[in-house]
Amino acid sequence: MNTIRNVLLIGASVVTAAAQAQDGEDYDFKFFVGGAYVQPLNDTNVPGANIETSNEFGIELGGEWRMGNRLGFEVAYLDVEQDIEVNGSRVGDIDMKPWNFTLNFHMVDGDTFNWFIGPTISYVDWGDINTQFGSLATDSETTWGVSTGILFGLGDTFGLEVGLRYIDSTVEAQGPDISVDPLFARVGISFRF
């Protein structure tokens, strides 16, 4: 939670500093591709064991449709494979493939600097847990989250995008559920038109 609080404080500072530089976005659509670092913020404790997923890198693709001056609808897809660890030792792996749907509010809406934040609804497609003893089926889930990002314009069309996304997510399988609650930190290239 300290990380989220720090991001919000930094964002408020950026808004204050950049408010004078607003010049208005004029694109209707944006596509982006990049890498995302996934860090679970939670784990599961059962008697004699601490179960968690590992920090990993994945690929994120997405797009945004601007519905007005300050509002946009974003759809993003992430593909990442994480290790399942028990007491620090790897026992298997699992694929995490969330579809994230975010209503972006563009707080600072400029051609060269754009900061947005909004609520997220996620459909998380968890793969089976693969171990040396076989596979365990998991359930997919629909959950909530929050996203923020900054787009640095590189001319009229391209941009460098950085962002954070948190979702409240748990792996539900046979045996104990594994609380994950991942935070995604992404860096990518945007194409605006």
Image: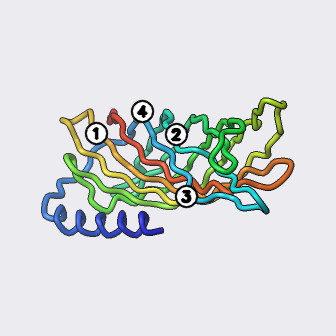
- Residue 158 in the image: x percent, y percent? 27, 33
The residue depicted at 56 percent of the width and 50 percent of the height is 101
Q: Residues within 10 Å of mark 4 (few under 14, many from 20)?
A: many
For residue 167, above or below residue 191: below
Q: Nearer the viewer, residue 74 or 71?
A: 74
For the residues labelled 4 and 2, the Cα–Cα distance comes to 17 Å
For the residues labelled 1 and 3, the Cα–Cα distance comes to 26 Å
Per the image, label 1 sits on a secondary structure element best described as strand
The mark that comes first in sequence, 2 or 3, is 3
Mark drawn on residue 56: 2
For residue 87, above or below residue 107: above
Residue at image mark 1:
160
Q: Nearer the viewer, residue 20 or 56?
A: 56
For the residues labelled 1 and 4, the Cα–Cα distance comes to 10 Å
Q: Nearer the viewer, residue 18 or 89?
A: 89
The mark that comes first in sequence, 1 or 2, is 2
Describe residue 156's horizontal placement relative to residue 38 as left or right: left
Per the image, label 3 sits on a secondary structure element best described as loop
Q: Residues within 10 Å of mark 2 (few under 14, many from 20)?
A: some
The mark that comes first in sequence, 1 or 4, is 4
The quadrant in which the C terminus is found is top left
- Residue 141 in the image: x percent, y percent? 73, 51
Residue at image mark 4:
33
For the residues labelled 1 and 2, the Cα–Cα distance comes to 22 Å
Disc 2 marks a residue whose amino acid type is Glu
The residue depicted at 64 percent of the width and 58 percent of the height is 43
Describe residue 173's horizontal placement relative to residue 18 as left or right: right
Disc 4 marks a residue whose amino acid type is Val
Mark drawn on residue 25: none
Disc 3 marks a residue whose amino acid type is Leu
The mark that comes first in sequence, 1 or 3, is 3
Mark drawn on residue 41: 3
